[in-house]
Amino acid sequence: MNNNTFVTAFLTRNDYNDAIVSERLVAPIVYLVILLLIGVPGNIFILVIYKNYNKHVYRKIIWIIAVVDLVFCLIGIPFNLGRMFNYYNFKSLSSCQIVAGILDSGIITSTHLLVLLTIHRFRQVCFPLKRQITLKNASYFIGICCAIGIALGIPQIAVLQPFAETDLGNNVTGYTCSVAWKNSPQAWKNYNTFLTFLFLSYSLVLFILYIMIGRTIHNQNKKRKLEFHSSHSGRSTIHSHKMTKIAITVSAVFAFSYLPLYLNEWATKGLDEKKLGLFTFSLLKIVQRSYLINHVANPFIYAIFDKRFRQQTANILTCKTIDTDHDKRPSETENSTQKPSTSTTVM
């Protein structure tokens, strides 16, 4: 007993850090590495396959979303890995604040682009005869989305969120780059409360718009069946069902991947992480970073519902010639304005 006391009395912050990394953070680190390995090439595939993005409004937005997601994977995931490997020994407060601000900007920009994409499809499906978003003004809307993202990400840096401090015992304090409200400025708490409200509001808007899109498609298909008893009507019904599945999938991935990020502080308030078991602690760290899935899942969602995208991906992987006319022909999920959700499949 005395020997153990003697040994622990000389443990440094690095020792405590190495211990938690090797004993409790292996699963979260593996999770982040997997996301990095599939997220970077997946988003590159989108950029390559849809390089002629200016031919369609929705593909133009998709292409920009893929750019944001790729940057997020190249910065956000390595940053989170750095936080893991230096869990109790994060040394640069400015790096923590600046990168957190960049990630917030990316998250907010991606969210607004998704809303823009949904509004574009909503107007095409529900109000096809009214003014639409065009290639000419789409760039302005995309610029506004990016500007809003940057503007709302700056407060993360400006309010100077401090390190989270952990008493490791023996007069040793651990410093963690984390999103924690404890000892945080009131301005930072207000800022994150606003972001949470924004997320919940946008999730509700997306849910309502997709419900209206699905209902419109359903009514249009019923009308077609009454007017045209042909195979075309059957194919249209299949497409409509596919679009509904896409909309549900996209909305679910967005909402469920971001929800833990915004509800983290309320769910873990007063929680002592040192008292958690290995499985619970590892699961908590993975769930807190579930928002990264939204920036990795896009190519997989698109591949599930777009056969041609799968073919182009296979061509890239097998070093075959890429179909340069891919953007000149309508995709199997975009051949009419009544098939809105193809544009949302990369969210």
Image (spheres, rainbow, N blue to C red):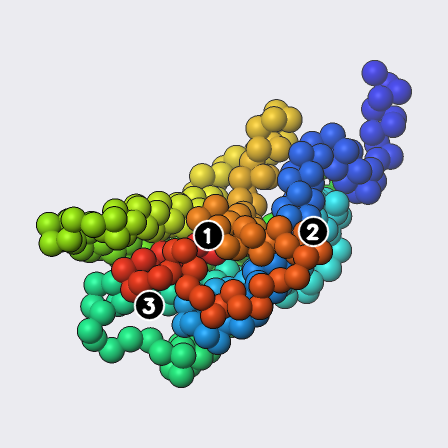
Q: Nearer the viewer, residue 5 or 238?
A: 238
At 53% across and 39% down in the image, what residue appears? 287
Question: What label sits on residue 306 in the rendered view?
Answer: 1
| Residue 61, horizontal then vertical, whole percent | 45, 68
Q: Nearer the viewer, residue 299 or 339?
A: 339
Front disc: 1 or 3: 1
Which image quarter is the N terminus in?
top right
Q: CA distance from mark 2 to mark 1?
A: 19 Å
| Residue 339, horizontal then vertical, whole percent | 32, 58
Question: What label sits on residue 120 in the rendered view?
Answer: 3
| Residue 87, horizontal then vertical, whole percent | 71, 44
Give, as a three-letter code, the residue at label 3: His
Query: Which residue in the rendered view is the most extreme toward the front?
Result: 230
Q: Nearer the viewer, residue 235 or 112?
A: 235
Report whether 155 appears left or right of 177.
left
The answer to whether any part of residue 114 appears in the image is: no
Q: CA distance from mark 1 to mark 3?
A: 19 Å
At 20% across and 50% down in the image, what residue appears? 230
Query: Which residue in the rendered view is the most extreme toward the top?
Result: 1
Q: Which residue is mark 2?
A: 318
Q: Is residue 185 above or below residue 268?
A: below
Query: Which residue in the rendered view is the most extreme toward the left?
Result: 226
Front disc: 2 or 1: 2
Q: Residues within 10 Å of mark 1 (few under 14, many from 20)?
A: some
* Marks 1 and 3 in Cβ contact (< 8 Å): no
Q: How many marks?
A: 3
Give, as a three-letter code, the residue at label 2: Thr
Report whether 104 appears left or right of 131.
right
At 50% across and 60% down in the image, what residue appears? 107
The answer to whether any part of residue 6 appears in the image is: yes
Which secondary structure, mark 1?
loop
